[in-house]
Image (spheres, coloured by chain):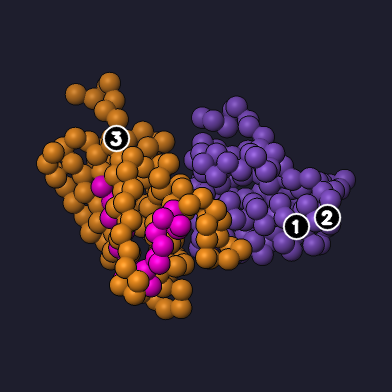
Chain colours: A purple, B orange
Amino acid sequence: MTVNTSFDDGTLTLRFEGELDHHAARGAVRDVERAIEAHLPRACVLNLDGLSFMDSSGIAVILKAHRRVSELGATLLVTGARAQPLKVLAAAKLERLITIEHQKELYI
Amino acid sequence: MKEINGVKLEFTSKSANEGFARAAVAVFASQLDPTLDELNDIKTAVSEAVTNCIVHAYPDEIGKILVRAKLFSDNSVEIVVRDWGLGIPDVDAAREPMFTTGGEERSGMGFTIMESFMDRLRVRSAAGKGTTVTMRRTISVRAARK
């Protein structure tokens, strides 16, 4: 599980790759927090297109990012989730709290 | 309904084993010819159940986790995840969405996800003796199959 960071014009993009479970979550939270503190973004994008698996541990990682980003007055967008992580996001009704961008081509 | 195959896995409550447990059960259940979505549902539910053992049953020690999977003649799979840890004081409360005693790193959605991804979920727990989670899922019989 890796988190790749890119920052451009106030937008911090964090791309997750691999399997995000409880085992990987602690490292993911640390990487996300470090990146947010380093860049203090105006907008943050969590790109999940590299995630082949995610369970509810991923929900906690996203909620943590949401909390910190909200404190900064910035926006958070979750994008690129494949079918399995998307179903977990839906079961947790995360779209009530966070904008989840659905990308049709990623439903394959 | 007849049991047609069964497997038993025992491992220690180390978080590195979460991936092993869900992958092993998924490979075993693939004998029922599930779709990728069905297989992912099973993987996700197993991951949640095993994570609960690691986080909640054995918070301060490494304990034993047993996963048993059985395939039945009606094309269903039953998965039992058992620990001998702390137990859940109030199972009904623990099954409520967003309920967690796991702190900020947990979302409290584990049982909710197990419930919505499987057909049936039963939780039995006794304080100090451990918890047994039993899940069942029927795999759709695909038209192309004989």
- Quadrant including the N terminus of chain A: bottom right
Q: Secondary structure at mark 3?
A: loop
* Chain letter for mark 3: B
Q: Dot 1 corresponds to which residue?
A: A68
Which one is in front, B70 or B17? B70
Residue shown at the point (58%, 45%) measured from the top left: A50
Give x and y (percent) for residue A102.
63, 32
Q: Dot 2 corresponds to which residue?
A: A72
- Marks 3 and 2 sit apart, C-alpha to C-alpha, by 46 Å
Classify mark 2: residues with Cα within 10 Å, few (<14), some (14-19) or many (20+).
some
Q: Do marks 2 and 1 both belong to one polypeptide chain?
A: yes
Closer mark to the observer between disc 3 and disc 1 = 1
Classify mark 1: residues with Cα within 10 Å, few (<14), some (14-19) or many (20+).
some
Residue shown at the point (48%, 52%) measured from the top left: B96
Q: Would residue B64 be visible to someone looking at this image?
A: no
- Marks 3 and 1 sit apart, C-alpha to C-alpha, by 41 Å
Dot 2 and dot 1 residues touching (CB under 8 Å): yes
| Residue range corresponding to the magenta coloring | B78-95
What is the total number of numbered labels drawn onto the structure image? 3
Q: Secondary structure at mark 1?
A: helix
Dot 3 and dot 2 residues touching (CB under 8 Å): no
Above-or-below relation of A32 to B146:
below
Q: Dot 3 corresponds to which residue?
A: B139
Q: Residue furthest bottom?
A: B61
Above-or-below relation of A30 to B48:
below
State left or right for residue B98 relative to residue B120: right
Q: Residue furthest left?
A: B2
Give x and y (percent) for residue A24.
54, 61
Which one is in front, B90 or B97? B90
Residue shown at the point (29%, 25%) measured from the top left: B142
Give x and y (percent) for residue B45.
40, 49
* Chain letter for mark 2: A
